[in-house]
Amino acid sequence: MNLDQILNELKECVNGETGVVADLARELITVQAQYKSGELNKEEFDFLVKEIADVKAADGLADDESACRWICECAEALLLVV
């Protein structure tokens, strides 16, 4: 999966959606945009993406394993392609 595919999936999730999954997808999109614009360095980017996947997704989606897994997979893919 390439960066555009990941971002498109995240954007599709955000469009017209509310709730924890949409919020986390929105955060991943924002962090990636901040990294791309130079507001974040690679270390900051990695930390924030891992924080979203490891802490926020686990806490916010504890009752929805498939959504948690999807957010974590997107986060992991972002770390690999950026």
Image (spheres, helix red, strand yellow):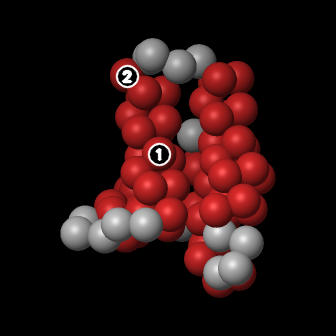
Which of label 2 and label 1 is nearer to you? 1
Which image quadrant for residue 69?
bottom right
Indicate which disc residue 71 carries.
none
**Residue 65 image offset from top left, x and y in percent:** 71, 81
From this viewpoint, is residue 22 visible?
A: yes
Query: In the image, what residue type sits under mark 1?
Result: Glu
Name the residue carrying label 1.
27
Residue 63 screen position, x and y as percent: 70, 79
Contact between labelled residues 1 and 2, with CB atoms less than 8 Å apart: no
Q: Secondary structure at mark 2?
A: helix
Residue to which mark 2 is pinned? 37
Q: Nearer the viewer, residue 27 or 73?
A: 27
Q: Looking at the picture, how far across and down is residue 6, in whole percent? A: 46, 61
| Residue 18 x/y as whole percent | 35, 66
Q: Image height check: is 22 above or below 75?
A: below
Alpha-carbon span between mark 2 and mark 1: 15 Å
Q: Is residue 67 above or below residue 24?
A: below
> Pointer 2: residues within 10 angstroms few (<14), some, or many (20+)?
few
User: Residue drawn at (43%, 27%), measured in percent from left and top?
Assistant: 34
Q: Is residue 76 visible?
A: no
Answer above or below: position of 1 versus 28.
below
Residue at 57% across / 40% down in the picture?
82
Q: Amino acid at mark 2?
A: Ser
Which type of secondary structure does the marked residue at label 1 adopt? helix
Q: Depth check: 22 or 7 in front?
A: 22
- Picture layout, residue 44 above or below residue 67: above
Quadrant position of residue 19 = bottom left
